[in-house]
Amino acid sequence: MRLLLLLACATVLPLSAETYYRTFFHKHPVKQKIRPGERVATRTVDSSGKDHLSQEVADAPNPLTGPFFVEGAEPGDAIAIHFHKVRLNRDWGYSGYRLGLFAMTPEYIEKTYPPVYKRDLVRKGYAHYVPWDLDREKGLVRLREPGSKAIVMEFPAQPMLGCVGVAAAGDWAPTSSPSGPYGGNLDYNRIGEGATVILPVFHPGALIFVGDGHALQGDGEPTGNGVETSMDVEFSVTVRKGAKLTGPRVETADAIISIGSQPEFQSSLDRALEMATTDMVQYLMSEHGLEEWAAHLLIAFQGKYEVVTARGSMALLIPKKALRKR
């Protein structure tokens, strides 16, 4: 597969957003044209539209920064978005107060507590959010209130981007809430600093959007959100000509990953697992030279499945150490 050469990889383009969008649509005005290899520095706002200064600058939910037009990217290609920096840029975030009903059994749901904490505490007009303090120096996420009598609700931060996507195929304009083959609101907690997100291209320039930063999120996003906050982001892009991907892939320092990406509540996780598995077979054959039978057996004995969203997407990981060449 032919790659566009990296150009001016040390260049950093500082780009502050003035307008945010909430659809992955190819007709939004381009924020910036970028060349492969150029390093872009930008910011995202939180899912409620508040920025790094805690000012409300966009409408909820999940305002998107972008689109970024990648020179040389054409339909049928793929783009690889390399995230060099995904970092907290303020000292607070928020999350839901209760697990989503979609994550629990009907028998338990009848007895669980209502999702009501304090009205207007985090967002005006809402009572189902709780605040978290973000210690950027120590890299910790700490629940401000309520306080547990049993444990300390303090955990290592794991900054990530919930929304990473390109303009969807045709004249479709999916909102920033679901995910799909274009990426979108993937809410996958491995998409952070050092990760590479690989997406199919449906329109000239690909048209990249990012947003929905989380300071921390467990597998499956079972509250329906992470610890929502704003982010400082730096990324660069390479173009993979003629890749013909069908959905998102991710690469980290230690794994290659296929995502069975679909909107939540549309189909079962079984379908998402099938999508991820089928794509991983193709991934191993086309990118790593495995025979089809070898791809099947490697998945069977080295693969790891992860729930990306509790009623939506699944991921299949293959550790890079299992891809030793002869």
Image (cartoon, rainbow, N blue to C red):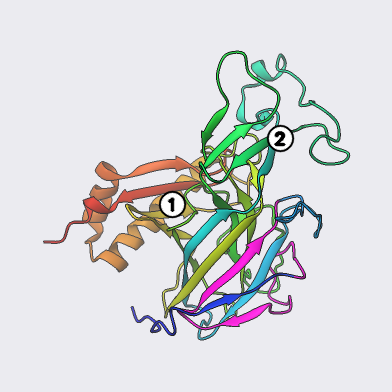
**Is 167 a magenta residue?**
no
Do the residues bearing badges 2 and 1 touch, measured as CB atoms within 8 Å? no
Q: Is residue 37 left or right of residue 183?
A: left
**Residue at the image position 65 percent from the left and 41 percent from the top:** 225
Judge whether 246 appears above or below 139 on screen: below
Residue type marked 2: Pro
SS majority, magenta: loop
Q: Is residue 160 something one can see in this rendering?
A: yes
Whole-number angstrom distance, CA of label 2 to CA of label 1: 35 Å
Name the quarter where the N terminus is drawn: bottom left
**Residue at the image position 56 percent from the left and 40 percent from the top:** 217
Q: Give the residues in magenta.
A: 18-46
Which of the 4 image quadrants contains residue 293? bottom left
Q: Is residue 155 left or right of residue 222?
A: left
Count of numbered tags: 2
Looking at marks 2 and 1 on the same chain, the residue that comes earlier in the sequence is marked by 2
Number of residues whose C-alpha sits closer than 10 Å to that of mark 1, classed few (under 14), some (14–19) or many (20 or more): many
Judge whether 234 appears above or below 311 on screen: below
Q: Is residue 41 left or right of residue 65?
A: left
Judge whether 107 appears above or below 60 on screen: above
> Residue 2's spot in the image, x, y percent?
35, 82
Residue type marked 1: Ala
Circle 2 residue: 131
Judge whether 82 appears above or below 266 on screen: below
Q: Is residue 185 something one can see in this rendering?
A: no
Which of the 4 image quadrants contains residue 80? bottom left
> Residue 272's spot in the image, x, y percent?
50, 47
Name the quarter where the C terminus is drawn: bottom left
Q: Which mark is residue 276?
A: 1
